[in-house]
Amino acid sequence: MTSVYVINGPNLNLLGTRRPEVYGSTTLADVEELCRQEAGKLGLELEFLQSNHEGQLVDWVQEAGARVAAGECIGAVLNAGAYTHTSIALHDAIEGASLPVIEVHISNVHAREEFRHRSFVSPVARGIVVGFGVHGYVLALQGLHQLSR
Ligand code: DQA
């Protein structure tokens, strides 16, 4: 079965309790369930991952890229959290692994602090979903599936 990765970066494990006025009260387990249902509808196997560590995210991007190259995976939905705004390593990993990525942010980062306006992921992403709350993950899965057809 073809797979899709959903990769979550730092502090997204705190979803539900961390700044609910910004990120809502849905937990990461709820987001996983949402993604599992959508992936099922799209006929895809879901790999749902979260890490607070930049190098682990780089490893998963490389792993997903290798699976895309092997024809086993359509790409990744990536919410890199704050590493979005800092990580040249993630930028290089996405580019180097030729991984089709849809960048997701729960909040509208462009309506927030200026340091959130810059993304090192966007230039190497196939698409971007911003500001739709956790429903953005579903939209990103649909968009990635559409692009892969
Ligand atoms: C976020 C936005 C980032 O700026 C922030 O550091 C996060 C979450 C979002 O989903 O809105 O951790 O990626």
Image (cartoon, rainbow, N blue to C red):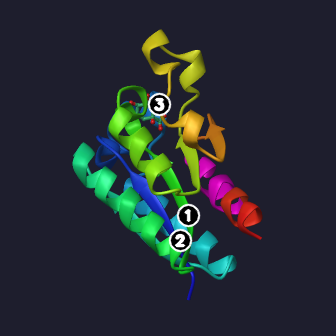
Q: Amino acid under label 3?
A: Phe
| Residue 65 can be seen, yes or no | yes
Q: Residue at x 69, y 76 (%)?
A: 42
Q: Is residue 2 magenta?
A: no
Give the CA distance from mark 1 to mark 3: 18 Å
Mark 1 vs 3, N-terminal side: 1
Q: 125 left or right of 83?
A: right
Q: 115 left or right of 105?
A: left
Residue for badge 2: 68
| Residue 52 can be seen, yes or no | no
Quick one: label 2, few (<14), some, or many (20+) residues within 10 Å? many
Where disc 1 sits, the SS reads strand
On the rendered image, what quadrant is the N terminus found in?
Answer: bottom right
Report the residue that reaches farthest toward the top.
114
**Contact flag, marks 2 and 1 (Cβ < 8 Å):** yes
**What is the magenta segment's predominant secondary structure?**
helix
Residue for badge 3: 120
- Please state which of residues 93 and 4 is positioned toward the viewer in this rendering: 93
Quick one: label 1, few (<14), some, or many (20+) residues within 10 Å? many
Magenta-highlighted residues: 134-142
On the rendered image, what quadrant is the C terminus found in?
Answer: bottom right
44 shown above or below 115? below
Q: Quadrant of ligand 1?
A: top left
Q: 17 left or right of 30?
A: left
49 shown above or below 20? below
Q: Residue at x 46, y 28 (%)?
A: 21
